[in-house]
Image (cartoon, grey):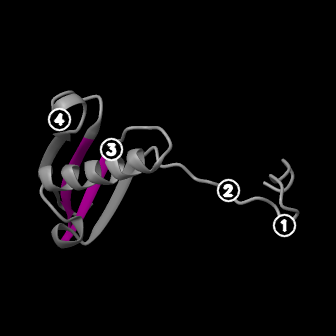
Amino acid sequence: LPASRVESIHAENTGLGGILANKGGIAAVLTVASTKLYFLTVHLQPHEGRANFDKRNADVEEILAGTGGDPSVMAHHAFVFGDLNYRVAFPTSTRGIAPTKEES
């Protein structure tokens, strides 16, 4: 197996007041052979609506800043996991109504 090393592990809380750890993220940077890998796991706030979407985006920015910065600069490959809570709005069918179960 190639040599591997944990370069860093950082956490950033974005829960109530930025203190509670019920929301936030953990980032780990590992080196395997000469390749740096960045792993981020997050739990973002739920709910629909533009305000919640904007809050999720702001929380991601806060998590990245609090865990070391831009993963595209820190590592060769980045992986993001977790409960992102982004919502998907599926389009209606070509008939102008919600798609049936078979169409989904």
* Amino acid type, mark 2: Phe
Name which residue lies at 25% across and 62% down.
37
Q: Residue 19 location, x and y as percent?
A: 15, 30
Residue under label 2, please give it: 90
Left or right of residue 58, residue 100 in this image: right
The span from disc 3 to disc 1 (Cα, nearest Å) is 36 Å
Which residue matches tag 3? 42
- Mark 2 is surrounded, within 10 Å at the Cα level, by few (under 14), some (14 to 19) or many (20 or more) other residues, namely few
Which element carries disc 3, helix, strand or loop?
Answer: strand
Q: Say few, some or many: other residues with alpha carbon within 10 Å of mark 1 (under 14 / 14 to 19 / 20 or more).
A: few
Mark positioned earlier in the residue sequence (3 or 1): 3
Classify mark 2: helix, strand or loop. Answer: loop
In the rendered structure, the answer to whether residue 64 lies left or right of residue 68 reads right
Proximity of marks 2 and 4: CB atoms separated by less than 8 Å: no
Pointer 2 and pointer 1: residues touching (CB < 8 Å)? Answer: no
Q: Which residue is mark 4?
A: 18
The residue that appears at 86% across and 50% down in the rendered structure is 100
Which portion, as a residue range, is magenta? 25-42
Mark drawn on residue 94: 1
Q: Mark 3 or mark 2, which has the lower sequence index?
A: 3
Assign a secondary structure to mark 1.
loop
- Identity of the residue drawn at 39% across and 47% down: 51
Q: Residue at x 17, y 72 (%)?
A: 73
